[in-house]
Image: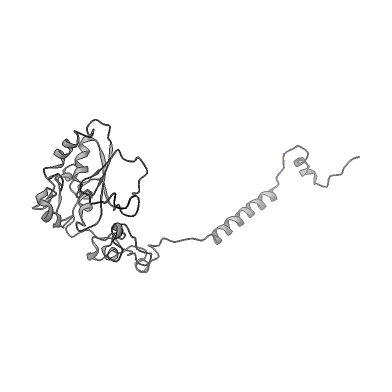
């Protein structure tokens, strides 16, 4: 008993084992349907513009970001003392990062200090930087006798000392080498907590040890800025209520020399 096929002769091959024969009209319809899908996706997909470009001050300037006021030369949006002073001091919570909301954030470019010039090149920058690039002498006044830094003419000079090693970081590293294999190549990465101006991490570079230094923004608010100006890897951070933003076993050793962190105070 035979069956009659209702398909046109030129399309019967699709069901009889042959290949599908596309006509020009099929191609046109396919392209049209794809265009409709893409159009609907573009129309109904929510788009978020750059929050900086949509702020009123930037919009008035024609899309360019205006400079901040000269008084904001030390602006750190997530490390603002004016905001931190209103927060809890328990477990040093107020010294941690607290970023402004979208409405509070300033949409402007932080200006350089007056008289700013191209930084002293490495490795000379480890020992001296331009005074005008970091015109803050509080650390030199308070910590100069401990070898942190000194103001000499147009420069800040870094003898290489610190609170726990006023005779210099190099001698301190020599003493540590008696107990820790600092010069054998076993240790390659380190974390320096409460680093000051990062002389310890800076001088460890001579031993081929890359040290990441951190300290909070406290009464010595400029210490990390000095470290960065010297060319030493450093950033603002406080070990308080949050874990450090590093995966396990990121560092071969951790150094804390009078860093004032109560490790055992909260049984954590």
Tell me the residue at 58%/55% (across/down). Answer: 38
In which image quadrant can residue 113 be found?
bottom left
Residue 203 position in % (x across, y down):
19, 40
* 155 magenta-colored: no
In the image, farthest residue toward the right: 1
- Front in this rendered view, residue 78 or 37: 78
* Relative to 10, 43 lies left or right: left
Magenta-colored segment: predominant secondary structure = loop
Residue 138 picture location, percent across and down: 14, 57
The image quadrant of residue 180 is top left
Write down the region rendered in magenta. Answer: 18-22
Q: Is residue 19 magenta?
A: yes
Residue, x 61% and y 57% (percent of image)? Answer: 36
Drawn side of residue 57 relative to residue 257, left or right: right
Q: Position of residue 94 (x, y in %)?
A: 29, 60
Judge by depth and name the residue closer to the eye, 235 or 35: 235
Q: Quadrant of the N terminus?
A: top right
The colour scheme is one colour
Q: Residue furthest top?
A: 184
User: 9 or 247, which lies in front?
Assistant: 247
- Image position, residue 165 (x, y; %): 14, 44
Point 25% across, 37% down: residue: 209
């Amino acid at each position: 008993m035979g069956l009659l096929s209702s398909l046109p002769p030129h399309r019967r091959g699709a069901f009889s084992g042959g290949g599908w024969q596309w006509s020009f009209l099929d191609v046109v319809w396919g392209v049209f349907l794809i265009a409709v899908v893409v159009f609907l996706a573009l129309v109904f997909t929510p788009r978020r513009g750059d929050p900086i470009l949509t702020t009123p001050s930037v919009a008035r300037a024609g899309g360019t970001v205006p400079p901040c006021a000269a008084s904001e030369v030390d602006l750190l949006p997530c490390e603002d003392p004016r905001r931190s002073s209103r927060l809890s001091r328990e477990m040093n919570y107020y010294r941690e990062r607290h970023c402004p909301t979208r409405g509070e954030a300033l949409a402007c470019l932080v200006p350089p200090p007056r008289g700013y010039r191209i930084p002293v090149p490495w490795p000379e920058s480890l020992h001296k930087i331009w005074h005008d690039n970091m015109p803050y002498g509080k650390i030199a006044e308070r910590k100069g006798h401990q070898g942190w830094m000194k103001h000499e003419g147009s420069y800040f000079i870094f003898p290489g000392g610190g609170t726990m090693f006023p005779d210099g970081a190099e001698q301190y590293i020599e003493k540590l080498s008696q107990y820790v294999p600092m010069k054998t190549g076993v240790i390659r990465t380190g974390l320096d907590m409460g680093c000051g101006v990062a002389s310890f991490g800076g001088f460890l570079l001579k031993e081929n040890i890359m040290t990441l230094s951190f300290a909070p923004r406290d009464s010595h608010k400029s210490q990390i800025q000095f470290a960065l100006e010297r060319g030493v890897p450093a950033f603002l951070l406080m070990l308080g209520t949050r874990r450090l933003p590093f995966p396990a076993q990121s560092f071969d050793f951790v150094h804390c020399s009078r860093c004032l962190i109560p490790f055992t105070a909260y049984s954590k």
